Image (tube, helix red, strand yellow):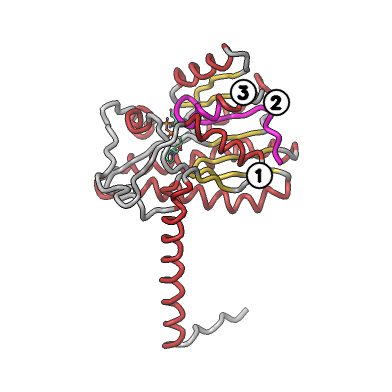
Amino acid sequence: MTDINNKTAVITGGGTGIGRGLALALAREGTTVAIADIMIANAQQVADEINGSGGRALALHCDVCDRASIRAMKQAVNTELGEVQLLFANAGATSFDPLVEMTDDDVDWIVQVNLMGVMNTIRAFLPDMIAAGIGHITATASMAGLLPGWVPQHVVYSAAKMGIIGLMMNRAMEINAHGIHTTTYCPGGVKSGMKERNGLYRPPQFGGPQPQAAVQVPEKSFKDNPLKFYTPEGVAPMVLAAVRNNRPFVFDHAEQRQAFRDTYSSVIEACFDDIERYEQEQGRPPLAED
Ligand SMILES: NC(=O)c1ccc[n+]([C@@H]2O[C@H](COP(=O)([O-])OP(=O)(O)OC[C@H]3O[C@@H](n4cnc5c(N)ncnc54)[C@H](O)[C@@H]3O)[C@@H](O)[C@H]2O)c1
């Protein structure tokens, strides 16, 4: 069990959407929250809302693509609020574009914010957690990472989100022994403002904000699985329950089980059928000598 009451938490991307929902839910548990976001005005609004209703929150500017910015944010959190026990590496941005139409900046941004952003954030906070022997890290990935064949034109995003899943599963082996637990959250449809605001999140090193860049979700997406949307306020308690119980994963849409089963059973059957057939026809490759 991870005790989430009266702790100190950092939430990246806490200014809106899922991160905001988590910040408000944590504050209701008596947890002090640092809301770190590239959109500082949004982070400040959430902090004001929490402070105005008797909680304690701090808003900080942070670009998770920029390690120096994360280090500065961590320094400020430690100075103002002390040690951090709960980390939510949640900031992200999306893209629904054919790979060949994406610019180098588009690709770099989506990989940096989604995958490296989580990696950078964890690397900044983990050493203190290991030293203290206490902590819980939650990373927001996506069902698009688990089901990369589900949504078209989502190549770079799906790859980055699948990368988060790999990093969290592997890192869990490394850090559970230190008393630190991990949860990977794979949202499967939560109503946030990402579609409208996404272009505003682009940091200067990738071309800066592009307010006109509307996200167009391809029409045939989710044709066979019409997507239902929960609210950030609705999913936050699910995520916190998983953190409390040290559950390695949270999927918020129970009806996505079949899509998950279909995806992985077809991968398993295709891969193993092929290798078994090859071995029957050609024999096994010789083993390497030491
Ligand atoms: N909403 C969904 O259905 C859904 C589905 C799958 C995954 N996700 C993931 O959930 C997370 C939260 O997204 P959301 O849906 O709440 O959208 P959102 O747009 O409301 O929230 C994203 C937050 O991240 C912040 N952010 C973006 N780039 C940043 C950067 N470089 N540094 C710091 N902060 C940055 C934004 O300012 C914003 O507050 C993201 O990682 C997203 O990929 C969401």
Q: List the residue tagged with mark 2.
A: 6
**On screen, residue 49 above or below 67:** above
Q: CA distance from mark 2 to mark 1?
A: 17 Å
Q: Nearer the viewer, residue 215 or 220?
A: 220
Q: Which residues are magenta?
A: 1-23
Of the numbered discs 1 and 3, the one sitting upstream in the chain is 3
Ligand 1 - quadrant of the structure image: top left
Q: Residue at x 71, y 34 (%)?
A: 3
Element marked by disc 3: helix
Q: Residue at x 48, y 16 (%)?
A: 45
Q: Position of residue 134 (x, y in %)?
A: 72, 38
Q: List the residue tagged with mark 1.
A: 246
User: Is the distance from the Cβ of mark 2 to the nearest ligand 1 atom less than 8 Å?
Assistant: no
What's the residue type where badge 1 is placed? Answer: Asn
Q: Nearer the viewer, mark 1 or mark 3?
A: 3
Q: List the residue tagged with mark 3.
A: 28
Quadrant of the rendering where the C terminus is positioned: bottom right
Q: Are marks 3 and 2 in contact (CB under 8 Å)?
A: no
Q: Position of residue 29 (x, y in %)?
A: 65, 26
What's the residue type where badge 2 is placed? Answer: Asn
User: Badge 2: how crowded within 10 Å, few (<14), some, or many (20+)?
Assistant: some
Q: Nearer the viewer, residue 209 or 215?
A: 215
Of the numbered discs 3 and 2, the one sitting upstream in the chain is 2
